[in-house]
Amino acid sequence: MGENTEAKKESAMLIVQSKVRDLIREKEMRTSDEFITALSEHVRQAVEKAVARAKENGRSTLRPADL
């Protein structure tokens, strides 16, 4: 049961899909569900890297430079 909960947390969407889709539509483009999922994963990885960098620098606050 714990593993399933962890998997759900990891797969939770980190972006507001409707806002992303609206932005893409404004550019007169379309998007797939796979793009939205990949974008969310990209954000997750960026945050993980930023957290690691902040910790390496002895901070508990993320800053733009951590990206």
Image: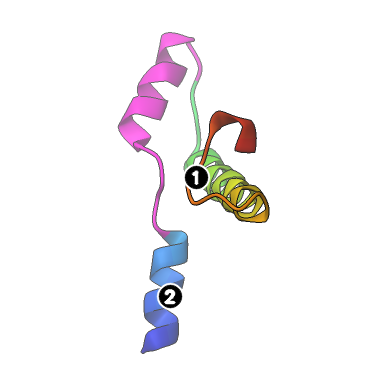
Which of 8/27 is in front? Answer: 8
Labels 2 and 1: the sequence-earlier one:
2
Instruction: Answer whether residue 67 is visible to the viewer in this image.
Output: no
| Residue 53 visible from this viewpoint | yes
Q: Label 2 is placed on what type of residue?
A: Glu
The residue wearing badge 1 is: 40
Q: Please give the residue where the numbered disc 2 appears in the rendered image.
A: 6
Residue at 36%, 20% (x, y): give it. 22
The secondary structure type at the circle numbered 1 is helix
Magenta region: 12-29
In the image shown, does 31 or 6 lie closer to the viewer? 6
**Can you say whether 51 is above or below 66 in the image?**
below
Alpha carbons under labels 2 and 1: distance apart: 16 Å
How many numbered marks appear?
2
Residue 21 in the figure: left or right of residue 54: left
Rendered position, 64 above or below 3: above
Q: Dividing the image into 4 quarters, which one contains the N terminus?
A: bottom left
